[in-house]
Image (cartoon, rainbow, N blue to C red):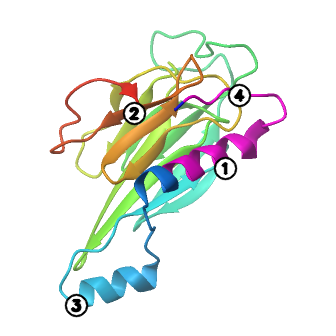
Amino acid sequence: MTMVPTSARGHSGWTAVLLAAVMVATSVLVATPATQAATVEAGGEATPTVTVRPGGPGTYAVGDTVATIERVPSSTGPAGDDDPQIYPGWDVCVFDMYGYRGWVICRMEWSAITWVSGTDTYEEVFVIGQDWSVWHIWRGSGGWKSLGGRALAELGNGAFVDVNPVRAMTFGLDADLWCRYRGTGNWAGGWSRC
C-alpha cells in the first residue's frame, strides 16, 4: 500500500486515510463499552478497543487510567540531551503514564488499545518519541519501550495500532505505511510495509 502525502491532505486527511485503510484491510469492528460489557457478562473476552488521539497537551482517559501530556521548553530534555528537537518547528511534550515519563513529538497522533476481560482492563499506549521512533507502554512494563522505526514528520501521522492482528503502524520516511507485529506478545521481528 503506497500513500503519498499532499499538502491538501493535512492533519485530518492522514488520519482518515489510515483509519480507512486499517478498517478495510482488517475488517475490524471496534467494540463499544456496551458491547464489551455484554461480551464479558457472557463469559467471553471482549473485542479490543482502539482509540486514536490527536497530539498535543492534555489529560486523557485511557481505559481505567489517565495519561498526561505537557509541552516543555525546547531546551529541556532527558539527561544529557540539550536539544530534544530533531526537526525545527516540532515541539516536544512529556507524556506521563503509569508513573513513567516519556518524551514525545507533541503534534503526532497517538493510540491506545484496550482489552477488558472480566474485571481486568489492559491498556497499551503507542506514541512517536522525540527520536521519531515508535514507543509504547503498558501497566507493569517498567517504563517506555522502543519499537524502533522512523516516523514521517507530517501532521496527521503518528503511532497507530490495529487489532487483527495486533500491530503498531506509522507512515515511514518514504510515506508508506509501515507495521511491526506483536506476534505472541514480544514484538519480535522488525518493521515491514503493511
At label 2, the amino acid type is Cys
- Residue 16: mark in rendering: 1
Distance between the alpha carbons at the discs numbered 4 and 3: 44 Å
In this rendered view, identify the residue nearer to me: 140 or 124: 124
- 148 lies left or right of 110: left
Distance between the alpha carbons at the discs numbered 1 and 2: 17 Å
Task: Write the residue at 28% across / 52% down.
Answer: 139
Q: Quadrant of residue 113?
A: bottom left
Closer to the chain start, of discs 4 and 2, is: 4
Task: Write the residue at 31% across / 48% down.
Answer: 166
The image quadrant where one finds the C terminus is top left
Q: Which residues are magenta?
A: 2-22
Pointer 4: residues within 10 angstroms few (<14), some, or many (20+)?
some
Judging by the rendered image, the residue that carries numbered circle 2 is 179
Pointers 4 and 1 in contact (CB under 8 A)? no
In this rendered view, identify the residue nearer to me: 37 or 179: 179
